[in-house]
Amino acid sequence: MDYFFTEEQQMIKELAAQIAEEKVKPVRAELDETGEFPWDIMKTLAQSDLFGLFIPEEYGGLGKGSLELCIAVEEISRVCLGVSTSYAANALGTYPILIIGSEEQKKKYLPDIASGKRLVAFGLTEANAGSDAGGVQTTARLDGNEYVLNGTKQWITNGGEAEIYTIIAITDKSKGARGASAFIVEKGTPGFTFGKKEDKMGIRASVTRELIFDNCRIPKENIIGKEGMGFIIAMKTLDKSRTGVGAQGVGVAHGAFEEAVAFARQRHQFGHPVISFQAVQHMLADMAIQIEAARSLVYSVSRFIDSSTKDISKETAMAKTFATDVAMKVTVDAVQVMGGAGYMKEYPVEKMMRDAKILQIYEGTNQIQRNVIGQSLIREAARKK
Ligand code: COS
């Protein structure tokens, strides 16, 4: 398929693919085993300017959009979803500053994020606030010129590795979700520590930790936007980032598909390569159709985000849901096409299948996405009346 990329987009694709092949592929099994954070790879991505893709040029970035970010994320995900999660979580953590941060905040933080000098993490989830994003219990109390944060964030990607954290906390309990606000907290601030590193089923090259705030005092200027805007900032952040999760789905599905095709060509049974059997061909055909459909949706929603000022919630939820459901189905089918070999750690598809599962869960479960889509449909129908 020709997706009519510009010369620059094609270059980004080739650059990300080259890094994935040369730097990520040789170590992905080891990273999966050890769960070590891929600092060397992050440095290579930084030297290649890939952290600055979506950041405006005036803040040291390349001034590109969601499509370029998705292209890079897809290529890295094709080889290792754990590494692509560590990379893509930076965009998630940066969006609150990018969407509504003050000029001072943008000037202070974005150049270091664009250069890859400082990694970013987004802290919304808590023990009692996952799908129910409005259920956040971490508090931020204004005391003179400082906010004092108390509470614990759970399952935070890049937790402990990142230097900059965008955190959702409650400033006015009486207002529920409307009493939430967003803040920037830097690693090293007294009262800000990290919990244990989680031991995960997949994406083990990404690090997940608790963030613990115990009377953590931050300058009052570190609020993003105004008090009470936290829930909307979180929703708009997720609207922007969910297409990237879709791109992760396309990437891991494509990677698994390639492995299945290569294996089916060389594996012989009944005197023939297994790819010559129609049962296998039909599975591969279905996988190819689903990947192409998911990729088309992710690219067209990315182009929509980059060129429109309209509400993007429904479309990003659609791209995330469809592409990540495809990722799960295709990685499971890749294991099936490869049979016993697919189940063995010697081949990468068992890792891809384990990795793919998180895509249906994080940045809003696919059930929540369907709620978002359903609510949008209701609003659209009401407007037409
Ligand atoms: N953009 C702008 N505004 C939005 C919005 C969006 N994407 N989504 C909701 N809002 C607004 C609503 O319009 C509503 O405004 P009013 O109070 O003026 O009517 C307000 O926010 C509350 O919205 P709603 O009533 O829909 O909130 P709910 O508590 O029912 O929750 C869902 C909505 C479930 C969609 C939200 O909590 C969600 O996305 N949850 C998943 C969070 C998630 O992804 N967690 C994963 C961890 S983060 S990596």
Image: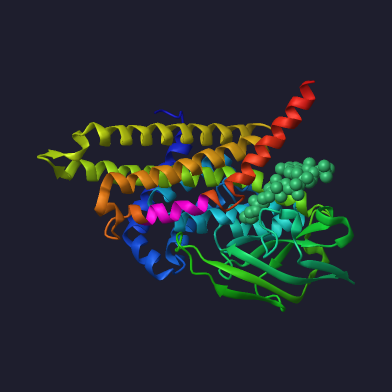
In the image, what residue occupies the spot 26% across and 47% down? 338
Residue 151: percent from left, percent from top: 73, 71
Q: Is residue 38 left or right of residue 156?
A: left
Residue 67: percent from left, percent from top: 54, 39
Q: Is residue 347 left or right of residue 370?
A: left
Q: Residue furthest top?
A: 385
Q: In the depicted view, which residue is nearer to us: 253 or 303?
A: 253
Residue 367: percent from left, percent from top: 61, 45
Does residue 264 sit above or below 2 in this rendering?
Answer: below
What type of secondary structure mainly makes up the magenta span? helix
Q: Residue furthest left?
A: 271
Q: Report whether residue 240 is seen.
A: no
Q: Does the segment drawn in magenta span residue 105?
A: no
The magenta span reads 351-359
Residue 122: percent from left, percent from top: 64, 59
Quadrant containing the N terminus is: top left
Q: Is residue 211 left or right of residue 287?
A: right
Q: Report whether residue 203 is seen.
A: yes
